[in-house]
Amino acid sequence: MIGLEQLLILSAILFIIGVAGFITRRNVIIMFMSVELMLNAANVALVGFAYHFARMDAQLIALFVMALAAAEVAVGLAIIVTVFRNRETVNVDDLNILKW
Amino acid sequence: MEPLAQNYQLLRWIVLAPLAGSAAIALFGSRLPRRLIGPLACGAVGVSFVIGVAGFVKLKALYSQGGQEDAFLADTLYRWISVGGLTADAAFVLDRLSAVMVLVVSGVSFVIHVYSIGYMAHDKSNWRYFSYLNLFVFFMLLLVSADNIGLMFVGWEGVGLCSYLLIGFWFEDREKATAGKKAFILNRIGDFGFLLAIILIFTQLGTLDFYGIAEQAPRVLEPGSVLATAIALLLFMGATGKSAQIPLYVWLPDAMAGPTPVSALIHAATMVTAGVYMIVRLNVLYLLAPFAMGVVAIVGVLTAIYAASIGLVQNDIKKVLAYSTISQLGYMFLAVGVGAFSAGIFHLMTHAFFKALLFLGAGCVIHAMRGDQDIRNMGGLREKLPVSYWTFLIATLTIAGFPPLSGFFSKDDILWQAFSQGHWLLWFVAFAAAGLTGFYMFRLLFLTFWGTCRAEEKVRSKIHESPLVMTLPLVILAVLSVVGGIVGIPEALGGSNDFHHWLAPMLANENGTLPVEPGRHFPHWVEYLLIVLSVAVALCGVFTAWWFYIRKPETARNLAERMPISYQLLSNKYYIDEIYHIFIVQPIRLISTYILWKIFDVGVIDGLVNLTGRSVRGLGRVAARLQTGYAQAYAVTFILGVALVLGALLW
């Protein structure tokens, strides 16, 4: 029987994978995917709570997160495309001029 | 027993009317027609005088209806200061002493305002002049009618400010602007002592109110104690600045750079007497400090003879009068120093009349001479300026002390008091100064009005008497100089010395608060003898002046050539200005330049400011290293932060 506990473990595993991916990979697109992974880890936790406590509001938040992720993808991918056109690279180590 | 205070609402307008006049002229003066400004200023002062007279009449009625002897009129505007135990009201009193002062100040001011209409008629910024002059009257009346020493200090500083503004009235002339600064700075030195005295009075007596001080001082302060002496001496330091006594007198001769009516009003009749008024007002404190009284008397008498000796050889008509003023102020301080407070105020009053008259007369002469002030270029003005001559003659006779003019009674009162209190040395010095006074005043009169005219032809042909608006004030002051002494005719001459009896209830040594042993009693013939002596010495001075400058005009030059050292010493005013310059001004300037400026200001002050700037910049450089530009570095920081916060929440 899959209960709340298992769902939360799954969520945590997904989240940690996302964090690890975000800070170790240098490709912006991979980092981007890692962010999506973290968002979805949160969604799993939310839906799990909604199921367990039989409440609708957590599900509603999960829907919001999805909408937000979609919007983020739209803007984020557009930025990445623009950066690639200008710099011919998507390696974050080369994208470091935004500083003092 | 509480002194009886009667509320009298009109009192505030004595002080506020000139303030309103000053403000109106300052704000709208440049747009008002010129002819209106003078009368407006006169009107404002006139209001003060009329209310002053009304208050005086009311005060007299109060006494004659059997009121207490120390009853007074009071008017409180509002609570001015209330901090901890310190309270002071913006309140005015009209008592026996301030009534005299208010009448003298507003009366003489009014006459001089009228004179100024004529004197300043052609000045392009006469509205500025009248605004300052009204402001001065406001501060002076505030000074004399304030009910506490704090408010008095406001007036004290205010008159100093107006003095500065009016000495430097023609500020385009650098020398005149400098004279104004000199007066201001020397007064600041004195005011420093005054302020310390106020603080001491408050901490020791717990009150700033004059009546509170008079009540508390005998209870709290031990007679002759160090504390009482310190307070009295610090107050006297303020008085030496404002009233031009040794060692702070040097600003007054330079103050003659201002317009002549200003010299008459501020630097002869009113402001410079503020120190005398202050000592009389706080006579309780002085009577508790006999040593300070001695200092006051000695400084006074030294100033009297010292300034008179300089006056002997000055050639600028206003400078002679300036040194004469310093000398006469010395007499007043001698009087208060020997405990004859009423004699001091009496001389203050008569001096206000005759010295204002002398200055205004000098103003007419300068006017006629097209601005020339050198008496060596004058002479023979008697026929051309008859009104100026006759009034000047009356004033000269008055200051020299010829009976029955007012100056005779007031000066003799001082001499007699000094003598009868047993200060024979002080009496003798003052007596000698009286002889010098007779000489230098008549020297001035002879050189200016007698003999033949030594002016250049183009000036001589245009000499004419001043208009009525200037001569009328001369006549008024001349009448006052003649009859002003009536109020103080001593008992020995068949009078009743009303002036003394009027002030006596205000004086701690007369009203029984601090009784002093009466001086030795002398028979009347001693007093007569002294009177004869002092008239004789004045006559001697007059005769010598006549011999030197009319009979044998070459005598003075011969004498000067035979005694070159003393002549040089006198005509260079004992080199006091030069000595001050070398021993005080120069060291201060050197210290300021090479230590305070070059080292302290540039090194420490500027250094601290620069240090602040540099350290912030250095810190910024270090902190900027945190911003690497690598997105993942930020992410790691972020994650670590979250981990920290979570950790803190969970454990």
Image: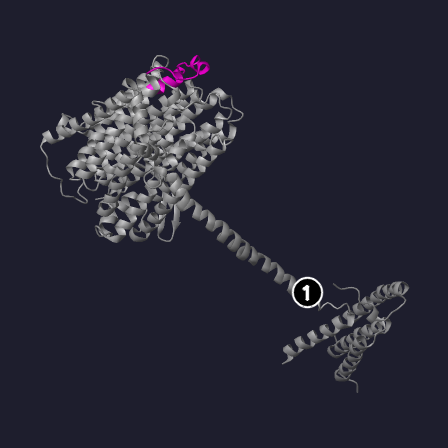
Q: Nearer the viewer, residue B571 or B556?
A: B556
The residue segment tinted magenta is: B451-474
The x, y position of residue B451, in whole percent, is 33, 16
Hey, which residue is sitting farthest bottom in the picture?
A1
Number of callouts in the render?
A: 1
* Residue B175 in sight here: yes
Amino acid type shown at disc 1: Arg
Q: Is residue A56 above or below residue B433?
A: below
> Residue B651 placed where, x, y %?
63, 81
Residue B580 lies, in percent from the top left, at 39, 43
Where does the image place residue B112, in percent across and percent down from the top left? 38, 25
| Of residues B358 and B537, the one drawn nearer to the viewer in this rendering | B537
Q: Residue furthest left?
A: B523
Q: Is residue B585 left or right of residue B522?
A: right
* Above or below, B60 relative to A57: above
Q: Which residue is mark 1?
A: B621
Judging depth in this view, the residue of B218 and B647 nearest the camera is B218
What colouring does the structure picture have? one colour
Res B520 → quadrant: top left
Q: Residue at x 75, y 72 (%)?
A: B633
Q: Quadrant of residue B74?
A: top left
Q: Nearer the viewer, residue B532 or B202?
A: B532
In the displayed structure image, the side of residue B642 where residue B135 appears, left or right:
left
Image quadrant where residue B106 sits: top left
- Asked if B526 appears above or below A90 in the picture, the reply is above
Q: Residues within 10 Å of mark 1 (few under 14, many from 20)?
A: few
- Is residue B328 highlighted in magenta? no
Task: Write down the chain letter for disc 1.
Answer: B
